[in-house]
Image (spheres, rainbow, N blue to C red):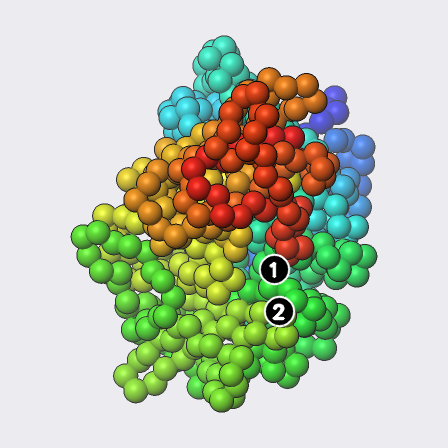
Amino acid sequence: MGFDYLWFSNGLGFGLETWAATGAVFDGKQFHRDKVFETRKALLEFWRLFRAECPTFRVETRGTNQTTGADLAADGVDLRGIYQGDFNILPPPNSPWAALNGDFGFELVGYMSRIAELPADEYLFRFYTHDPWWLNSPWLDRYGRAPHDIYLPMAVARMDAEGNVAPPTHLNFLTIDDSFGNMPKQVPDEVIPHILAARYASPDAPGPTVWVYPFDEYHDWADTQPERLEEIFFGDWFIRQAINEGFPLNTVVSTVGFVTSFEKNPKLYRESVLVTVVPTPNSIVEETLIRFVKNGGRLLVYGPITHAGEKFRELLNVTATEPLEGEFELESRLIPDTLLRSGVPTTINHRPLFCGGGLETVVNNSADPATKVRAVMKQNDKSRVAVVSRSVGDGKVIYVRGTNSADFPGGHLLRPDDRNRFFLGGSLMRYALQEFDFRFLVTKRGSGVAPPVIAVARSNNAFFFSTYSQNTTAELKLRFPQGAPLLLGYETIFEDSCSTYRLPRAEHRECRIFVQQEDFDTTVFCRERTPEELEITRRLEVNGLKNATVYIYPDTRITKDELNAYVNADRPWRTGKVAVEPGPATFGHCFVVRDVTGKLVVSW
């Protein structure tokens, strides 16, 4: 017919059921393990037959609305086999489903899980401007002209095996015309500036958290341990809920890429918390993760430990016992969100079908002084560990067993539990970051208010916060190990050593200043100032400080001698200059000024 380019839409080539959480293997009630190989064979045969007849067509793919793990466990989709089949395709981009239901957790998990490994060094970002099939123009109606579905997925980046941060190589729009073939100028005029702003701030370093995605492990387990399909299914769905509950995650590296990049540069992930599942026993991944922690690294592990090796159980100081299921009471020593009109629900429902099995984890050696149990789930006279942290030399590992608080009533996706009645298990991932001196807490009127979705990307040594607030009455309380982040252009009130913000529906803000100071009922802010001085390209003012320690993150190339700091001074910058010191190596390329009261102006 003369085609020279094809777009495989709506999951073509990537599953038998490309829209729902169920499929040929999982029917919503049980996993039919015997069907895994049958469906995998059928999908790979499609690609072989297609390429035999159409060997040269350029092919781009839409993929499914699911994730790598969810597709594999529910529908037998062998994404690794497709990627490695030399079919000359571009991998699926981010799904547009967040435009329909605000489920950014599922969009980001799907995107990251599919780019952890690639058929080549190329992948897509796609934005949903118009829809030619349905009478809607998402930018104007579904998004309400808010750019959250630009800044959140464009904060995503993958790490390759060389340790390089690789942003997307291709940009797609669906579509340039609306359902009637019109091309209203308003849409590109408004969308393009946001696309460019997000691209200017493309990640160029690992984020504060890095997902070490078990791309090969999931496929290997489906091959040789099909009894672990429930665990594969749970893993991606749990991280989906964690992101929807405010866990900041937007950098991904495959387990293979992590091992190789860490060997090449042991300091590459020094500023990041690695997030991953329990590794395969006696594997190079297990050995490298243990070495990472013992060398001072920070590791957050989630998922069942039923198949954990002895070395990793020893690292976590946990073991498996009789699995429990059903409703539990959560007892936590972690700081919860603040609810103004009610208490935080403490009942949590653990369904083995959606949680990789029953709750099986207990502490192995309770006398170990390096181990701290931070949360347990109790049922009558029995209890199981929900969150435990353990210091190992200069490093620390946190284990979150994980409850995917959701069921499947039918339809397309798993349905989260009613947050007015139940505690959602994904929140424990965000709370667990407190053990690494992070705070991502929310103040809200009631338990029914969803927390903001957050991505924190590193670009030119800055921290870029991209957020989606489903409910704009929710207030964020933020703190990092180096202090409370000051979002450029915003005022904040310090509370519990955190900066506080009530953000609009979509936000994308730069942060180069972190402050440590006692709580005062004063307004602190960071704003842009004009350079007005030769050889100065940037000037920032921070005001409202009281006996503060201030950490400054200038551009990547700036040295100590090129950074200026002035206390309670103004133009022409002849007085008030103070010395800056290099910050701790674990905080990255930063500088510190101590004991500042009043106004601090920095320039470079």
Disc 2 marks which residue?
A: 395
Q: Residues within 10 Å of mark 1 (few under 14, many from 20)?
A: many
The local secondary structure at tag 2 comes to strand
Query: Residue flagged by tag 2: what amino acid is it?
Result: Gly
* Quadrant of the image containing the C terminus: top right
Horizontal placement of 299 versus 425: left or right?
Answer: right
Instruction: Name the residue rendered at 34%, 60% in the picture.
Output: 336
* Quadrant of the image containing the N terminus: top right
Disc 1 marks which residue?
A: 274
Picture quarter containing residue 192? top right
Instruction: Name the residue rendered at 56%, 45% in the picture.
Output: 593
Instruction: Name the residue rendered at 59%, 46% in the picture.
Output: 592
Q: Position of residue 13 (x, y in %)?
A: 63, 44
Q: Nearer the viewer, residue 153 or 225?
A: 153
The local secondary structure at tag 1 comes to strand
2 vs 1, front mark: 2
Q: Position of residue 40 (x, y in %)?
A: 65, 57
Whether residue 132 is visible to the viewer of this picture, yes or no, is no
